Image (cartoon, grey):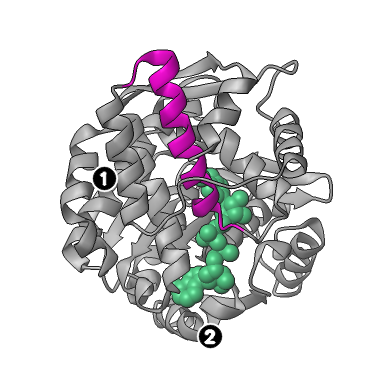
Amino acid sequence: MRLVQVPLGHRSYPIKVGGGLLSRLGAECAVLKFGQRCAVITDRNVGRTYAQIALKSLTASGFKPVLVTVPAGEKSKRMAMVETCYDRLARHRLERSSFIVALGGGVVGDLAGFVAATYLRGIPFLQVPTTLLAQVDSSVGGKTGVNLAAGKNLVGAFYQPRLVLCDLDTFHTLPLREYVSGLAEIIKYGIIYDAILFAQLERNLPKLLARDAATLASVVARCCEIKAEVVGQDETETGLRAILNFGHTIGHAIENSSGYGKFLHGEAISIGLVAAAKLSHQILGLPSGDVTRIEKLFAQAGLPVAIALSPAQRRKLFAAMLLDKKVNAGEVKFVLAEKIGRVKFGCQVPMPLIERALQK
Ligand SMILES: NC(=O)c1ccc[n+]([C@@H]2O[C@H](COP(=O)([O-])OP(=O)(O)OC[C@H]3O[C@@H](n4cnc5c(N)ncnc54)[C@H](O)[C@@H]3O)[C@@H](O)[C@H]2O)c1
Ligand SMILES: [Zn+2]
């Protein structure tokens, strides 16, 4: 098992990465000295295979868990579902010393984390992420929240978990498309922070695609370490944390303007990351060899690297980009790369250059 610490003073917490961790859930919670009552929040897909393992482990350690299962998918990330969860917790008489286990992908993590942040003004929670995206990204760093009809993630709280358990065995059931989508965030970490990780990904991509346990352990732990380091320096995104949004300005606009669901998050940011690499070449002088390496790695992972847009779709995409909540006073600020492993945030990019970067 690998151990990564998220350094946030008295709110610091460990991330454990390895096989077989879900069945150790109860023992891990016992060490944290929580009250007996707890809730496992999961979705139907994940619950089908993993809920009983979690409940059995918690019960064996003397806890009294209640299972709350929500429908799978982004539509569960909304206020009505938060209320459904509150009702279940209240009925099961969860109190201040009680805790919540978020068992699932980023949807469950964001929803259950927000429920934990707000129920009784906050009770402890643990993340047990079961998608690649959730293990390397959404379960670490304390962003929780839900969507509104007006847009994604518009309501939420910064609320850190007490522990993150990344059980690599849960990938055995993860659909290929979801798995590959998670690889996009992993490649992102290499570009923004770690040239050695990027080179390791180039060498070991076939092993990673085969879900090789040793490769996954080292890569997932390294990505968590990078996110922990960044979040440790800038928890609430006043500066440095913005580098995690590399490729996301365009990526979010693609997700949004194409109707959520057409592209998975990783697919949309893959297009956004390759476009950002091209812009980085033009604006910051990222070597063209690096642009080629970046595009090639995404393509070899099976991710899309460009998008064909009609004029109407292009207009929609640019309108979505200007509506992004990270845009200030109509100015689109980009994270751009100087070289693989180093990025700058707050870069101004002229719109016509963005258009060209999106084309093949
Ligand atoms: N909080 C953050 O910092 C942060 C960061 C990135 C993304 N997010 C959020 O994360 C969400 C996306 O997360 P996601 O990509 O994990 O999607 P998801 O939670 O919807 O999971 C994807 C699908 O895989 C299924 N699934 C999950 N684990 C499985 C497993 N082990 N075996 C079989 N099926 C499994 C789910 O039921 C779902 O159908 C978005 O809402 C996004 O906004 C949050
Ligand atoms: Zn992302």
Q: Nearer the viewer, residue 267 or 356?
A: 356
How far across and how far down the image is residue 15, in percent?
Answer: 34, 51
Q: What range is drawn magenta here?
A: 263-286
How far across and how far down the image is residue 135, in percent?
Answer: 40, 56
> Is disc 2 in contact with disc 1, using a CB cutoff of under 8 Å?
no
Q: Which residue is mark 2?
A: 48
Q: Is mark 1 within 8 Å of ligand 2?
A: no
How far across and how far down the image is residue 192, in percent?
Answer: 35, 31
Residue, x 42% and y 71% (percent of image)? 176
* Tag 2: amino acid: Arg
Q: Nearer the viewer, residue 2 or 217?
A: 217
Query: Quarter containing ligand 1?
Result: bottom right
Q: Nearer the viewer, residue 33 or 89?
A: 89
Is residue 263 in sight in this rendering? yes
Label 2 vs 1, first from the N-terminus = 2
Q: Is residue 27 magenta?
A: no
Q: Quadrant of the N terminus?
A: bottom left
Q: Which mark is residue 222?
A: 1
